[in-house]
Image (cartoon, grey):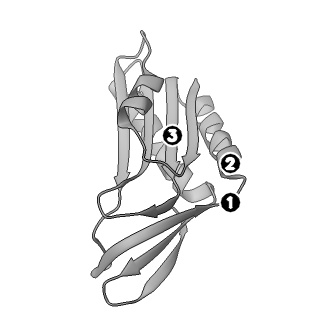
Amino acid sequence: MIRLIGVRDEPLSVDEVLAAVAAPGAGGTALFIGTVRDHDHARTVTGLGYSAHPSAEQQLRAVMEKVAADHPVHGLAAVHRVGDLRVGDLAVIAAASCAHRAEAFAACRRLIDDLKANVPIWKHQTFADGGDEWVGAC
């Protein structure tokens, strides 16, 4: 069921993620795309960098295994970017395919929520006012 896992320093591909979860029995595919936005808490974001612990892919696999155990998925995929990103860049893509849309939505939401809560990836944001901050997982 787990078709694609990645923590990468190169640009992410929506097409790659969708192809990874494609399955003949999948009537629904849910996709989440996280992009770098230009603001956070009323401050203008000028850029950010993601850093990952060496165990990040292993932790991501554990998250995906739990999602697969709890949802009737045909395919799961998740990739997260590391390194310096600009506003508009893709930061994370998660997808789930299932027989039905409600199942796909539930599995994809659980995948991205658990990724953010449990995978050791940190965000360092820089702001137009010269400030910066580190944000916990993702």
Residue occupied by mark 2:
59
The disc at residue 78 is 3
Sequence-wise, the earlier of marks 3 and 1 is 1
- Of tags 1 and 2, the one toward the viewer is 1
Dots 3 and 2: beta carbons under 8 Å? Answer: no
- Which image quarter is the N terminus in? top right
Type of amino acid at the residue the image marks with label 1: His
Left-right relation of 61 to 27: right
Which residue is at 43% across, 69% downward? Answer: 48
Type of amino acid at the residue the image marks with label 2: Gln
Q: Residues within 10 Å of mark 2 (few under 14, many from 20)?
A: some
Sequence-wise, the earlier of marks 1 and 2 is 1
Type of amino acid at the residue the image marks with label 3: Ala
Which residue is at 37% across, 21% downward? Answer: 100
Say which element carries label 2: helix
Which residue is at 63% across, 38% downward? Answer: 66
Q: Residues within 10 Å of mark 1 (few under 14, many from 20)?
A: few
Dots 1 and 2: beta carbons under 8 Å? Answer: yes
